[in-house]
């Protein structure tokens, strides 16, 4: 467990930081032949029922490549093609862009348990 952080003040109000559990929640993904990438998840916290996701192009951050939630069965990942509301990478011809997938591990009530970010270039060279 992480140690307690010292209290801090903001506009005259004192806030105390609670101890947060330490999780090694991380992810990676790979482009695949399906309509969305395959995502590998490591260290999902106990109680993770679904994964919230969002993908952005770091070279064109205003372009939304999709977001949503997918059920998580604890099997270590999200299969190729399992994401709905997803639009694949589409950099201009001759350019390579960096894509980031932001993930949140959520419990059954929708409360966030942990977060992770994974990135990959497209096209891969």
Image (tube, helix red, strand yellow):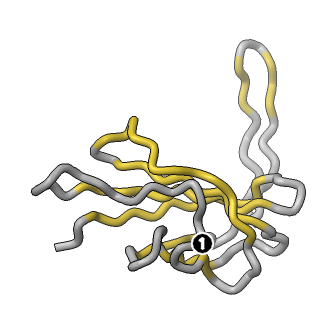
Quadrant where the C terminus sits is bottom left
Residue situated in front as seen by the camera: 9 or 28:
28
Q: Based on the displayed image, in which of its 4 quarters is residue 79 positioned?
A: bottom right
Q: Is residue 50 above or below residue 41?
A: above
- Which residue was labeled with disc 1? 82
- Quadrant in the picture for the N terminus: bottom right
**Which secondary structure lies at badge 1?**
loop
Quadrant assignment, res 124 = bottom left
Point out the residue furthest to the top here.
Answer: 11
At 34% from the left edge and 47% from the top edge, which residue is drawn? 58
Q: Position of residue 28 (x, y in %)?
A: 47, 73
Q: Residue lying farthest left?
A: 94
Residue positioned most to the bottom? 75
Toward the right, the furthest residue is 109
**Numbered marks: total:** 1
Question: Where in the figure is residue 92, as x and y percent of width and height?
Answer: 18, 49
Q: Where is 113 relative to 4, above or below?
A: below
At 45% from the left and 76% from the top, the residue drawn is 34
Q: Is residue 53 left or right of residue 96?
A: right
Residue 35 percent coordinates (x, y): 47, 69
Q: Looking at the image, which residue is at 62% across and 70% down?
A: 25
Vertical arrangement, residue 115 with respect to residue 5, above or below: below
Tell me the crowding category of disc 1: few under 14, some 14 to 19, or many 20 or more residues within 10 angstroms, Cα based.
some
On screen, residue 72 versus residue 116, left or right, reads: right
């Amino acid at each position: 467990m992480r140690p307690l952080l010292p209290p801090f003040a903001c506009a005259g109000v004192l806030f105390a930081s609670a101890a947060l559990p330490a999780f090694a929640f991380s992810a990676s993904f790979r482009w695949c032949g399906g309509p969305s990438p395959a995502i590998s998840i490591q260290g999902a916290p106990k109680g993770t029922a679904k994964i919230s996701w969002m993908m952005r192009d770091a070279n064109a951050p205003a372009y939304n490549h999709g977001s949503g939630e997918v059920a998580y069965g604890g099997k270590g990942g999200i299969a190729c093609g399992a994401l709905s509301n997803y639009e694949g990478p589409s950099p201009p011809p001759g350019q390579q862009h960096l894509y980031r997938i932001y993930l949140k591990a959520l419990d059954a009530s929708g409360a966030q348990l942990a977060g992770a970010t994974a990135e990959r270039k497209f096209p891969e060279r």
